[in-house]
Image (spheres, rainbow, N blue to C red):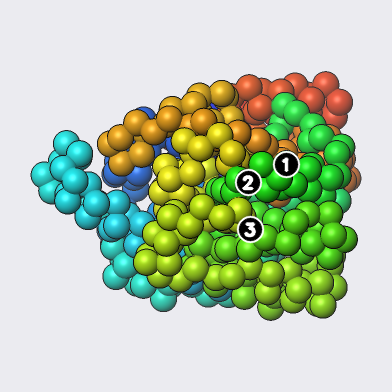
Amino acid sequence: MQLQFLGATDTVTGSKYLLDTGRHQVMVDCGLFQGYKTLRLRNWDPLPLDPAKLDAVVLTHAHIDHSGYLPLLVRNGFRGSVHCTMGTAQLCGILLPDSAHLAEEDADYANRKGFSRHRPALPLYTAADAARAMRRLQPMQFGKRFQVVPGVEAEFARAGHIIGAAIVTLFVDGKRIVFSGDLGRQQDIVMRAPEMVRQADYLLVESTYGDRRHPDDDPLDVLGEIVSRTIGRGGSLIIPAFAVGRTQSLLYCLHRLRELKRIPDVPVYLNSPMAIDATMIFSLHPEELRISREECAAACNLATPVQSMEQSIWLNHDRSPKIILAGSGMATGGRVVHHIAAYGPDPRNTVLLSGFQAAGTRGAALAAGRRDIRVHGKDIAVHASVEQVENLSAHADAAELMTWLGGFHQAPRRTFVVHGEPQASDALRQHIERDLRWAVTMPEYRRSYPLD
């Protein structure tokens, strides 16, 4: 039995793990690479397997770096089932078409403006590919073991990261192989804590924040101060927000701040059709939340939804103080890029980064202090204030990861540290080896490891 790592090694994106039992091939997660161009180009490389011979896919959750390669896998011949939770299936129903739409939109824009070196520029996949992929989804319940293929069973436990996020345990030949997926916070502002897993023969654990602790500041205090300061100088707040998870946490924080009268009562716009739909799905799963149904409803109804491109363009011309939440969370594409281009040159405004910014993204460049970014072939000077709220992360930090790992009753035979930048992954490796005395491996891209 072999486990091959086709992504999320030395990077936080592209999660794909191929389990070959000798009889069947099962892929856990099927994500896109994001960030640096060298990483994004991997999305165009053929996989070292025939998708038509792949038996099944199991998803930990719906974020594009874990699910976004599915349309391409299906287009290239995959005809098996994709097992996931109900929440993941619902969110994939909006994330995958949106990913395809953005790919088509960016290719069309590049062709019209002529800044692509390809003639014509083509999307990675289309809306039709995404629709075919969604027909492969088979929702399963948390806590119920099910058959993936003959000889391989799986069970989902709540990961607390976003709605539907799961820790996946595969049962194969008497062995338990656990994939943490993305683990949530122990004290997240809206999501319940990840469930403990007690046993694994082999474990894959994420390490996004493996080298750092989240601040202890109350996110309401930090966000309230930034909003008040920006509005006080007549500016607007532009928040690149992940449509799933981060947007809903921000809406809840803004709702609480307004309810407590700690921020000015200015318009709040949600400029992301995908985030609008995701917020509706968020409200359908109260069992995964730590806030009440009433609080959830109030937060979800806080913002004015912006559906059309015309409305989005109008926002760029309306200079009255406001708060705009728009995708994408790392400013890699989507409508927020146009808002940053429009609002970034004015020092009265603020660009607020509210989550992890993968290396190579515009968000990471802004967080590192860069004040000029390239948007659709043009250099844009950013004189707006750039702020960060770091304690709204949906990822467990180093201490929380170690708390979760401490829940195992005995050491796995081997632990693979994945889904982190090299420094973060290596820091977590050292923590595990020193504090738990487990055998740990930082896997190499595309390398296979025997599970024997």
What residue is rendered at 66% in x and 27% in y?
A: 424
Which element carries disc 3, helix, strand or loop? helix
What residue is rendered at 16% in x and 36% in y?
A: 117
Q: Are marks 1 and 2 in contact (CB under 8 Å)?
A: no
Q: Earlier in the sequence, mark 1 or mark 2?
A: 1
Q: Are marks 3 and 1 in contact (CB under 8 Å)?
A: no
**Residue 367 occupies which quadrant of the picture?**
top right
- State the mark number for residue 229: 1
* Labels 1, 2: front one: 2
Q: Position of residue 398 (x, y in %)?
A: 78, 33
Q: Position of residue 249 (x, y in %)?
A: 72, 58
**Residue 132 occupies which quadrant of the picture?**
bottom left
Q: Earlier in the sequence, mark 3 or mark 1?
A: 1
| Label 1: few (<14), some (14–19) or many (≥20) C-alpha neighbours in 10 Å | some
**Residue 126 occupies which quadrant of the picture?**
bottom left
Residue type (three-letter) at the residue carrying disc 1: Arg
Q: Which residue is mark 3?
A: 247
Residue type (three-letter) at the residue carrying disc 2: Gly
The answer to whether 151 appears left or right of 211 in the picture is left
Q: Which residue is mark 2?
A: 234
Which element carries disc 1, helix, strand or loop? helix
Residue type (three-letter) at the residue carrying disc 3: Thr
| Labels in figure, total | 3
Instruction: Give the position of the C terminus as an image quadrant.
Output: top right
* Labels 3, 1: front one: 1
The answer to whether 109 appears left or right of 43 in the picture is left
What residue is rendered at 63% in x and 58% in y?
A: 247
